[in-house]
Image (tube, rainbow, N blue to C red):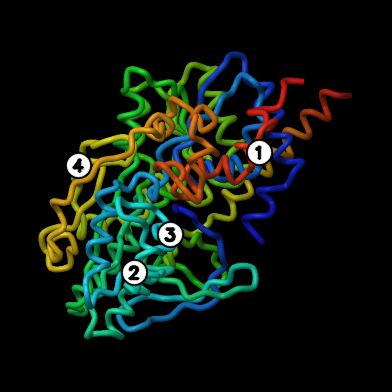
Amino acid sequence: MKFLDEYREADSVQRLADSIARTVKRPWTLMEVCGGQTHSIVRYGVDRLLPPQIELVHGPGCPVCVTPLETIDRAHAIASQTGVLFCSFGDMLRVPGSHGDLLQLKSAGCDVRIVYSPLDALQLAEAHPERRVVFFAVGFETTAPANAMAVHVARKRCIANFSMLVSHVRVPPAIEAIFQSPDNRVQGLLGPGHVCTVMGTSEYEPLARKCGVPIVIGGFEPLDLLEGIWMTVRQLEEGRAQVENQYRRAVRPEGNPASLRLLQEVFETVDRKWRGIGTIPASGFRLREQYHAFDAERIYGVGDLRTEESTVCISGEILRGLKKPPQCPAFGKECTPETPLGATMVSTEGACAAYHAAGRHLPGTPEKRSAS
Amino acid sequence: MCLGIPGRVIEVGRERDLLMGKVDFGGVARKVCLEHVPDAVPGDYVIVHVGFALSKLDEQEARRVFALLEEMGRLEGGAGQ
């Protein structure tokens, strides 16, 4: 398919890997932000094409992973109510809360449905005026404009039986928290391509400047990832810390003006708790006051629900790039995609789940090829 | 979750108050909301996420990396001679 196949072509991929090997002089630790990038890196073995001086650590950019346990529990509390039709993207259904996942709730007889788009949830609300339809609005800035559009249209069309349980997160505050942590290891960053199609690149300029870390906004295909790594390594070797855009075919510096206008109208920023990391100031979106009639957290009174995380798992350290999945004693043993203990195993885009799917929990799978 | 799939716009139209379209993903067509790329016309390539087009793909920029690779190949060939 156009815009996919040519970015996976083996000769081109190898040629870029060779350029990285020629450019790198010193050891560097780079982080890719996005779960989609992590998934692609592990799936195509991009990390194993890199010279031994470059270590890739995996960032917090998996919204399913970082959605806090109490938000999952709030979803449960709402979905269990009589008359509620609860809609969610498919990947949230298997995330375990304190009392099991949404899929189990569905098999117990609750009306939980998978939707492809937030507009599908809106359509269900219009088709079933006797039901109360709640949409689980999670995701980063990439997903926020779509979810904002659903609630914006609901308000315009006066669809009173539609509401959203909102747990949106923003990338830049999480990156800043990682960079400024005293134990930070990340020296260069592959920025989130699809987030930046919406937000543009300007939010990342002060981060690169303030923290002295080069940021290259990157795409998701093997060729994108390798070119992004090459651009980052070049900056590091030349002593620069700037924002560069590898994913120019999709990302404009100013972002998407239509999406940004809608986000501004529907959402305001709020402190948000990240599963495995904790509360990060101004790292989330919530509905503005004029949309409170569509705010499921208010309608169903679940805002005060509090829960505690399991202490066994090291996903917090993995999400901050301090450790990698095989360093966890539970990885591939008591913690598997079927029985996830924490954030990074719950979604296919989580670092632990991506490693597990690629068979990296099995003995004899090297972290990287030798330098030969 | 920020998965975005490139596809080609094959139809543009209004559905009640929303700008919608049909996008072809290598032979499979899906209905997509085009509100955020209001200037998209049939033939344009867009990145689609949860049923919404996020941005139009710039063909000229897309060719850039291949020009770079060609240049690399040329330099390598030159160095080897």
The residue that mark 3 highlights is B54
| C-alpha gap between disc 3 and disc 2 | 22 Å
The residue at the point 51 percent across, 78 percent down is B11
Q: On screen, A21 above or below A106?
A: above
Q: Marks 3 and 4: in contact by CB < 8 Å?
A: no
Viewed as shown, does residue A213 lie left or right of A182? right
Dot 4 and dot 2 within a common chain: yes
Few, some or many residues within 10 Å of mark 4 (<14, 14–19, 20+): some
User: Chain letter of disc 3?
Assistant: B
Amino acid type, callout 4 = Asp
The residue at the point 41 percent across, 42 percent down is A341
The residue at the point 64 percent across, 68 percent down is B26
The residue that mark 4 highlights is A271
Q: Which mark is residue A87?
A: 2
Amino acid type, callout 1 = Gly
Amino acid type, callout 2 = Cys
Relative image position of residue A372 (x, y in whole percent): 77, 20
Marked residue nearer the N-terminal end (4 or 1)? 1
